Every structure is written in structure tokens, then in C-alpha cells.
Amino acid sequence: MKSKQLSPVSYPLQHELLTARLHDPFAYLGAHPVSNETVVRTFLPHAEKVWLQTEAGFTEMTCAHVDGLFEWRGKDSIPKFYRIRMRKKNDAAPENLHEFYDPYSFPLQISDLDLYLFNEGKLHQAYRMLGAHHLTINDIAGIRFSVWAPNAERVSVVGDHNGWDGRVHPMAVHHQSGVWELFIPGFPGHGIYKYEIRNRHSGEILLKTDPFANYHEIRPNNAAYTPTHSSFTWSDDLWMNQRKHWDWLHAPLNLYEIHVGSWKRHPDGKFFNYRELAHHLIPYLLEMGYTHVELLPISEHPLDESWGYQTTGYFAVTSRYGSPEDFKFFINACHQANIGVILDWVPAHFPQDSFSLARFDGTALYEHEDPRLGFHHDWGTFIFNYGRNEVKSFLLSSAHYWLNNFHLDGLRVDAVASMLYLDYSRQHGEWLPNKYGGRENLEAIDFLRELNIMVHDAFPGALTFAEESTAWPAVSRPTYVGGLGFSMKWNMGWMNDTLSYIRQDPIYRRYHHNQLTFNQLYAYSENFVLPFSHDEVVHGKGSLLGKMPGDAWQKFANLRLLLTYQMTCPGKKLNFMGNELAQAREWQVNQQLDWNLLDYKLHRGVQLAIHDLNHLYLETPALHQLDFEQEGFCWADCNDADQSVISYLRYAQDGSFSLIVLNFTPVPRENYRIGVPARGIYHEVFNSDSTYYGGGNVGNPKQIFSVAEPWLEYQDSVIITLPPLAGIILALTPA
């Protein structure tokens, strides 16, 4: 049959369809009454012949344009949701016919209320509205696609299903919301797709991965998969119910920070998947005495070397290590073993990759247009526009998604300092002040407060951690008293001072004694975590062991001493993987940790010391119950700079205490007197110089009897032996 050739002037909507510019596909495609007839149009560029389902059966449609436009006109009734039958061009089996429901016979499904809340920045579960979702309409199953692209002239779902032709499945826009939608019946689960977007002003064509997709192709490919029906059944009710009533302020919290792809690998270098990780990691966490594992970002990202911090999928588990179901298995297994899981989450910036969020609809949609507000020169990334309501809905929904769908126990929020300050890492003239002329990012501050309110309200017992390195006040204080609302804040000041001190040759440490004591001036202004994180063992900084001065013996002794100090100081704990092995080299993302080091006594000794410190921390209320309260800490002696010794007491709620004494020189101290708050018999419960850990076994193996001799502020005292470059912990047996 000869096709009709129609001019753009006479048939503007047809012209828009054929040139991939059709803004309102439902105005042209599908069924439309015309006089006393019905006209049905469908665009199938790969079809040779097409038939329409009518009351009389399947009736052949007319080819209205050689590009693949087919049309039927008639008075026969057609079903509300009618089917189309197609024979493909050049099909090796011409008897093969493909039958499907016409997407343009189905009405739009997203509610006006959801659209309103999304546009107002108040839709915390936008992932249920946007993205790809299984949907059944009148017993007809398919996938509903939706995406926010307010400056688009046309948006289409493209993929293998339509030959990546943006003319086949153009989407409809919801009025002024900027949200586009299309239900495609019969669309398979685990099929790949993207959105093809044409900007209304420039005509630029963009091919974008769905921002709300749950699963992407494995890198370097980046299309999204349509969801499959979940078959996973959670069995962590006990953990989740207990978490609601968890008194985390007074509980031990010891985080093991890992990068999934480089903790351990298969002998051939392949990654462990999430299920394999559960099998290997959980027994290790339990044996070592960690309460939680903190994962470097496992949201989708294109480049391994970004460690996950260049996020392109804010709702997608990276496919490097398996599927979303596999990740649920991992978390469920952790919870069954009483291990919590914290996710590193990156709302501060996103990369420039053309397939992702950057200039999503041809304009600065998620970011600011002005680079003085919207671009990080240090990282080469875009900054979210926190003042745009839809962006706020996007980010809040991302946080909600991870906590809700994966039962995560908290979020570590990356680079908070960069969010708080408009002039962060910028020179004069490179930034714009806020409406009051200040440097504070008011919109980001509001976003962070809303984030923390949402998390603590919707997920009781879940935690939020701020990686914040400045003196911004009340980061971990409730929003109702003017704080940002985080549960805890990383104590970067303590970390920097401590590492700066420990790097000093012991002979010079007396001149830097204040770096050990200064922390107590602000230690209770926030709920602090004491971190030795991944950032401290990369980019030429050396491993923890590599930072230690002296010969081999001194390096290992210093490291054991450093870790003893961390585990006994007020504050919750975090250590990056490999610290417990005394890893000699810097962390490398492309290879596993050097587990063979455990064949060597000194490295094994550090691991054993960490093991015992961790368990002592868990089992001793004085070492964790009052981490955030001044009443939980008291100096025994903070002034012995000449000998580079500090000593302090840690108290529990019931008044019990531990006495910690740290000697930062390689000189053993005999007959060292320390004041104590109670009479009795003291005994050494930990000594980092034990031969068991690779030390020289200098210490106090016998009972230590207090004597009624005042020392400093105390009426009683003990005389002990201090091992060189070592820390000891003493406990009291009441007389």
C-alpha cells in the first residue's frame, strides 16, 4: 500500500512526531474521536504490517508514513485498552507476530498530591513516584516510567525494546510540574532503558540514565535496568525492633570502615559479591569486636578510583558487587549477627558525567547555573542546588530510600563542611554571598536540618554522622535548639592533633604536649566520633604505620600506643580497614589488603592488640557509657610534659572507672606515681607492650596496692611501671 507523504504545515503533530519533537504524544497517538469515527495512530518504525484490535477482530492498519506511522479509521468499537499486532520487517520467520497493548490507551497515573509535594520539596518518598515501577492497570501488567525534566520539549523512554528510537515511546508531561510519565504494558523486568531528552530552547538531544533507577548496567555501561519483582524476605525483625529503643548515647559504638572492592578479593582478583562479603566479613567483625561496619559509598558510580564518592546513581546499589537483592542479603545477615550497617552518603556534590545528573534536561537542573555557586574546582564536580524544592525532594528521598528499603542503620554524610560554606575552598571573587552578605549556605543548612529531622522521625534508632571539619557550632545538637540535628560528628580536630603529635620524634614530643590535652577543652561540645579513616591513608599521607617515627620496633610500639589512646579517649570509634593489620603501604583501591602481613609477628601483634582493645571497650562500661558527658572523664595527670606521659580516668554511670596511663617516649618509667580516686587493689587489664602483641613485656603483672599518700588532687596513689611507647589500662578491685 502506498503511504501518504504529508507536509509539516498541514499536519504539524505528525511532523513533530517524525522529527522527534512531539511534546504531547497523547494528543496525536492512541485513539481519538473524529466526527463519527475513531482514528487510532501508532508509530512502529520496525514494523512491516500492523493490525488493530477491534470488535470485529484484528484489522489491518494503514501505513501513513514510511518511517513507521500506522493509522486506522473506522466506526467499529475498540476496547478501552486495545491491543496491536505487528509483523517486523525482515523477520526470518514471517509467521511470527508480536502483540501488545498500546501505551497510549492508558491514562496517566501519578497523583496531583504527589506532584505537589515533590514540587514543594516535601515528598520524602519520591522514589515511589519517579523512576521505573511495576504497575498493573485493569489486570494488565507493565512498567510506569516517570522523570523530572521541566525544560524539555520532549522526553522518551528508549532502549532495546524500541531500537533506541526516541520517536516510539514519547512521554506525557504533567502540566507545570515538569514530571513526565508513560506506562508501557508488557515491558520486561531487567530490561535496559534510558531517557532521551530534547531541550525546548536549544534543541539539544541528551541521553540520560534514570536518576531514580535502582540498578544500572555494570561499568563502563550505564543504562538502567527496569526493576524485577523482589523475592527477598527480611528476617531482621528482632534487630530492627531493638534498634528503636537503642540508647546509642551510652552504648559502645565501634565502626569498621571498609571499601567493599578492596577489603578482600578472590585469588583471580575478582570482587566478592555482597553475599560472599557477608560470608567472609561478618565472622571477622564478630571476632574482632566491632559493633558496626561502615561502607564507603556503594551507590552507583562509573569510576573505581573515585571510591564511590562520584555518585551517579543516588538510588542504585552498584552492580560491581551484585544486585539490590544481594545487598539486602548482606545487611540482613549483619543484623542477624547483631552487626549494624552504616552507609557513606554523598549529597554534597555530583560528577560531570554526561549520562547522569549534570545539565539533565539541557539546563542546570540539579546544580546551580552560576559556577560560583554550582561547581567545586577542587573535585571537578557540581554542587546541588539545595534551594530548589525538587532537588531537596530528590536528596531527602535518596536518604529515605537507603534507610527504608535496605534497613540501613545510619548515614555518614560526606563533606558537610563544603555544604555549609559558600566560600569553601574558594578565593575572593570566586563565590557569592547569601542574602545577608554572609558566607553561610542557608539553603544547605535548611536541607541538613530537614534531613536529620526526617531520619530521626521516620527511622528511630538510625544514626546520622557528619564529616565536618570546621568549628561550626551544634552540628550534633537537636534542630529545636538551633543545631543541625546530626547524631554525631567526626572529631577531625582530635584526629589531626593526634596524628601530628604521634609523627613527632619522641624526643620532641614534650614540646607538643598540648596536642594531647587540648581536645578536652571542647570534647563535650558535640557527640564526637574519633576517626582514623580512609582519608588518612591515601594521597601520600602514608599508612598509620608509615606515619610512626623510629625504627621498626618503635613504629609498631607507637602504633599500638596510638590505637590504645584512641580506644580509651571519650568518643565513639572508627578505624579504616587495614589499620588493624599495621598495613605498611597506603590503601590502594585496586587491590585487596595485605592479609599476608598476619604471617609476621609484629603485624599479627597489632591485630591482636586491636582485638583485645575492642572487646575491652565493649565489655567495660567506663570506656563507653559517658563518652559525651564531662562526668565520664577526669585527668589523673595532664601536665607531665617533660616525660610525655598522660593519665586519665574514665567513669561509668555507676561510678566504676578505668585508669589509663600512656607513655609516649621509648623510656620505661619505674616507680611512677599516680593519684587514684579510690583505695583498693589495682590490676593491669591491658598493656600494649605485652609480648603477646609484639612488645617487650614491661609492665605490672602483679597486684598493685594503693597507698594513703596524696598525689596531685587525690588522697591515695599507686606506684607503677610504665612500659616504653605503650599504654596500660588499670582496673580496681575494691578493698
Image (spheres, rainbow, N blue to C red):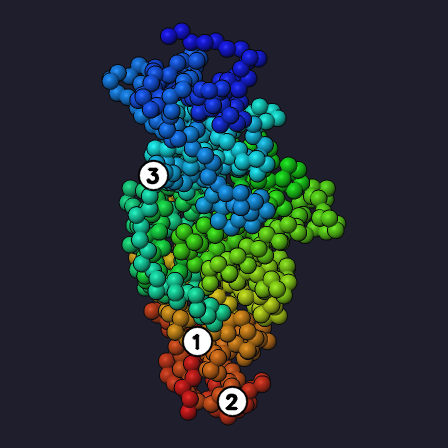
Residue 454 percent across, percent down from the top left: 53, 57
Where's residue 610, x and y in %? 39, 65
Front position among marks 1 and 3: 3
| Number of marks in the rendered image | 3
| Quarter of the figure with residue 359 | top right
Find out whether the residues at labels 1 and 2 contact each other: C-beta distance under 8 Å: no
Pick the quarter of the image with the N terminus. top left
Q: Earlier in the sequence, mark 1 or mark 2?
A: 1
Q: Position of residue 120 (x, y in %)?
A: 59, 47
Q: Secondary structure at mark 2?
A: strand
Q: Who is closer to the viewer here, 480 or 81?
A: 81
Local secondary structure at mark 1: helix
Q: Circle 3 — which element?
A: loop
* Relative side of 243 to 492, left or right: left
User: Pointer 2: what residue?
Assistant: 716
Q: Nearer the viewer, mark 1 or mark 2?
A: 1
Q: Which residue is mark 1?
A: 621
Badge 1 amino acid: Pro
Tell me if mark 2 has few (under 14), some (14-19) or many (20+) residues whose alpha carbon lies within 10 angstroms of its own. Answer: some
Q: Which residue is mark 3?
A: 139
Q: CA distance from mark 1 to mark 2?
A: 23 Å
Mark before the other along the chain sequence, 1 or 3: 3
Indicate the amino acid at tag 3. Asp
> Considering only order in the chain, which callout, 2 or 3, is on the residue closer to the N terminus?
3
The residue shown at (60%, 24%) is: 202
Image-quadrant location for residue 643: bottom right
Closer-to-camera residue (320/31):
31
The answer to whether the residue labelled 1 contacts the one labelled 3, judged by CB atoms less than 8 Å apart, is no
How much space separates mark 1 and mark 3, taking CA atoms? 59 Å
What's the residue at 62%, 50% (across, down)? 444
Farthest top residue in view: 2
Kindly identify the amino acid type of the residue bearing the numbered disc 2: Asp
